[in-house]
Image (tube, grey):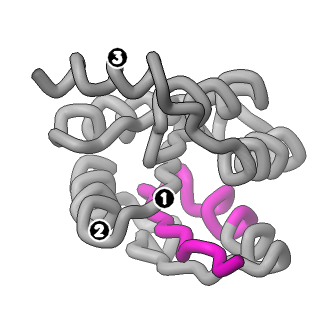
Amino acid sequence: MTRPTIIFASDHAGYPLKELLKSHVQERGYTVEDLGTHSLQSTDYPVHAKELCARVLETGGPGILICGTGIGVSITANRIPGIRAALCGNEFMARMSRMHNNANVLCMGDRVVGPGLARSITDTFLDADFEGDRHLRRINMIDE
């Protein structure tokens, strides 16, 4: 089975966790596309969130967005039609966001989740599959 390319973006506050998670998913056999930021220099999260979302819509994703809390990138991402961004602070949220909501963008906060939990949330998100059926009907209602 061919693994999808994981698209990453963060602001400066999310940069350390982005770098850690990129290495982690590469170790799992995924290819990574990094849209930035590429340093700790201050940057604006909406710019990176919008760029990632455009790329997810272009490629089918999935994407991983990280800022200090995960809140700013998730708010920005969810304003874009076709994006279903899930701010996840644990594995259950990550699993359900995929199984029931077919989330195509995972959002996390570098200042909220530690490295071990972030790796586990990422793995859960990437390993879960959308269940479809009644959940698809509900997702379609969002875009009506």
Q: Position of residue 143 (x, y in %)?
A: 16, 27
Q: Label 3 sits on what residue type?
A: Arg
Residue at (79, 68) in percent of width and height: 24
Give the label, 3 or 1, closer to the camera.
3
> What kind of residue is marked 1?
Pro
Residue that protrudes farthest toward the left in the picture:
144
State the mark number for residue 62. Answer: 1
Disc tally is 3
Residue at 53% x, 44% y: name it: 106
5 over 124 or under it: above or below: below
Give me the disc on residue 119: none
Q: Residues within 10 Å of mark 3 (few under 14, many from 20)?
A: few
Would residue 2 be counted in the magenta stretch? yes
Q: x and y percent of residue 76 in the render?
A: 26, 38
Q: Amino acid at mark 2?
A: Arg
Q: Is residue 83 above or below residue 5?
A: above
| Circle 3 residue | 138
Q: Earlier in the sequence, mark 2 or mark 1?
A: 2
Q: Which stretch appears magenta?
A: 1-21
Q: State the SS at label 1.
A: loop
Q: Nearer the viewer, mark 3 or mark 2?
A: 3
Q: Could you tell me which secondary element the residue under label 2 belongs to? A: helix
Would residue 3 be found to the left or right of residue 124 on screen? Answer: left
Residue 112 relative to residue 9: left or right: right
Q: Which residue is mark 2?
A: 55
- Quadrant in which the C terminus appears: top left
In primary-sequence order, the first of circles 3 and 1 is: 1
- Say which element carries label 3: helix
Q: Residue 62: where, in percent of width, then height?
A: 48, 58
